Amino acid sequence: MQRSLNIPVILSFIFFLALTFTLSIQAQDKKKITKLDDLPRYTYPIDIKASELLVSESEFNSFSKQVRKDIQNTLEEYEIEDKTTLKGYYATLRNLDMLEGNFESAMDYIQKILSLQEKPANKLMSGMIDMSLIESMQNNDSGDAELTRNLFSKNLKAKVDKLPWDVVQDDVEQLKGNYEIISENVLIGIIQTQVDPSVEKSKNISSDAAARIIGFRKFIEFILPIKENAVEILGDYIETNKVEKEDIWKDRDVDLSEAKDLSKVMVGIWDSGIDVDVFKNRIFINKNEKVDGVDNDNNGFIDDVNGLAFSLKEDYTTDLLYPMTETDLENYSNMTSQIKGLMDLQAAINSPEATELKKKMSSMNPEDLKPFLEELALFSMYVHGTHVAGIATNKNPFAEVLVARITFDHHAIPAPPTVEVAKKAADNYMNTVKYFQENNVRVVNMSWGWTLKEIEGMLEANGIVKDAEERSQLTRKIFDIYKDGLYNAIKSAPEILFITAAGNSDNDVIFDEVIPSMFDLPNLITVGAVDQAGEETGFTSFGESVDVHANGFEVNSYLPGGNTIEMSGTSMASPNVVNLAAKLLALDNSLTTSDLIKLILDGAEKSEDGRIHLMNPEISMELLKTFQQ
């Protein structure tokens, strides 16, 4: 769920692709689209498994023709300004053109997508692989596969060698790493795991799933045959230019480790749970409560000595860290190695863990993918809150952590959302914020969120309401309960600064309706992610509600048990801003929420293109001195 944790994992990098068409109606005759929910829904009846569309011919051809028609109609009938949506539509049409051999048209769509790119690396790299491949096929009348691969390598090398390393380093390394673990079996396994079960119940495919299947099929037919060539070219470029980016955060860092007599600051980590033993003397203690199965202080929560927690079904629980089974814990070390291997691959580090992960993925059968992905998701949930808490309290002995655990579903087909559970969640949001207030929490980190599309996808995956329009209405009802409940909870505590992650979907959080990062509230900051050099990451979401950017790339912090690991995501960027807020409060506990926001945002440095507002703790600290005079 995006009540999902904002850590980018394995295969989220490719194909949530889409489409384009030459618009034939004047804009004033079209219905204007202001949010994702306004777009029409389409479904496609099929009599076979969705995964079979990756290899079948006749069924795929009839299915793909209808998808193309619906996309073209959408582009003709609706005025769409959201660039992410347009890029998605154009990408699906590009993929269809490539699959049908219409390479000139595919090149047109590649250029249209390129014209919509805004992130610096995307402006340089978008369509690079596809263009190189199409050019090689157009210059190979014989159709010889080996010649095509050789021409592709030549074309790609010419493009890659021109790229400015300081701009594209992260994206090139991640592209190489992702290609190294993609195989036909992995792609088939994804569809078998995430789409086949819903199709079995509903006998149709949604337009989102359709775009994904088309993207995967294009990858299998066109990219997999030249994958090793691409990896080699990208690897050579990395080795030739391998110079670590400057880490700007070391010079900006503020260290209170040796400071004396500063104010204690209560920090709420509203997340997937925390291993309290990692933080020892820096954990909130409810002195009026003890662990005896009794609500000693009559606050409505039993044994809430260090905080409170809620289960997946929104029931109160005393487990502040997700309760793993014995088998899960036995596999913990192995999963840690696999996560490290994944991070190393995406950083082009040839570690033993990266080698082992590549070996595992290359030998994986489609049916092996489901348990593998569920293990990764379970691991991410288990470690996420502890990792976030370590970032939020780094080099600040005056920060104390209050745990507020929520639970995320790690299964490939998550439990279906319901009105009943949504109402319980809304109540729990308010109760959690009241708990923060009662225990003098000043700043709260929220590296999670919900999206409208996510809830709709969960309903679809479970075969809940087969009619697409009826399902969208139920989606809206459930989503609005979550949205209103969370909005009202945050709004009810103006004295607390809430800081949330923007998300990792490279999308506009307002258009796509992502909560809480879409909210406009005077006590909320939304954070995007940059890397160690302060450059925008490829995954970070954006939009007018994104206020500031912080380091969210390969950030080192704790795991349950006390070991450390580097992770990436806006989940890591958000607690870096919490860290600054808590240090400002340690130096001056009289600061109000509006004071904190002003010091953080006024200290941020705006990029030349206006996209990035780069947090600068040193400047914020200097502003504090002026503020206190």
Image (spheres, grey):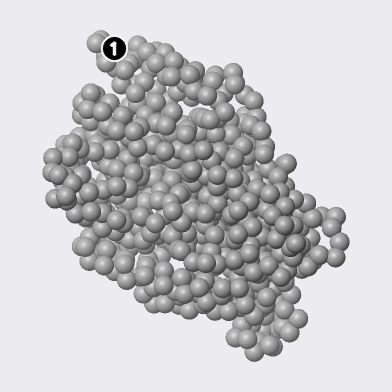
The quarter of the picture where residue 69 lies is top left
Left or right: 328 as drawn, with respect to 42: right
The answer to whether one can see residue 269 in this image is no
> Which image quadrant: the C terminus?
bottom right
Nearer to me, 251 or 177 = 251
Question: Residue 477 in the image: x percent, y percent?
Answer: 32, 71
Residue at left offset 14%, top offset 50%: 29
Q: Is residue 319 above or below residue 205?
A: below
Q: Secondary structure at mark 1?
A: loop
Q: Is residue 481 above or below residue 152?
A: below
Question: Residue 582 in the image: x percent, y percent?
Answer: 69, 61
> Which image quadrant: the N terminus?
bottom left
Question: Residue 455 in the image: x percent, y percent?
Answer: 37, 62
The answer to whether one can see residue 141 in this image is yes
Left or right: 226 as drawn, with respect to 174: left
Residue at left offset 45%, top offset 38%: 119
Amino acid type of disc 1?
Asn
The tally of labels here is 1
Question: Residue 61 in the image: x percent, y percent?
Answer: 17, 37
Mark 1 is surrounded, within 10 Å at the Cα level, by few (under 14), some (14 to 19) or many (20 or more) other residues, namely: few
The quarter of the picture where residue 418 lies is bottom left
Left or right: 57 as drawn, with respect to 227: left
Nearer to me, 86 or 546 = 546
State the residue position of label 1: 139
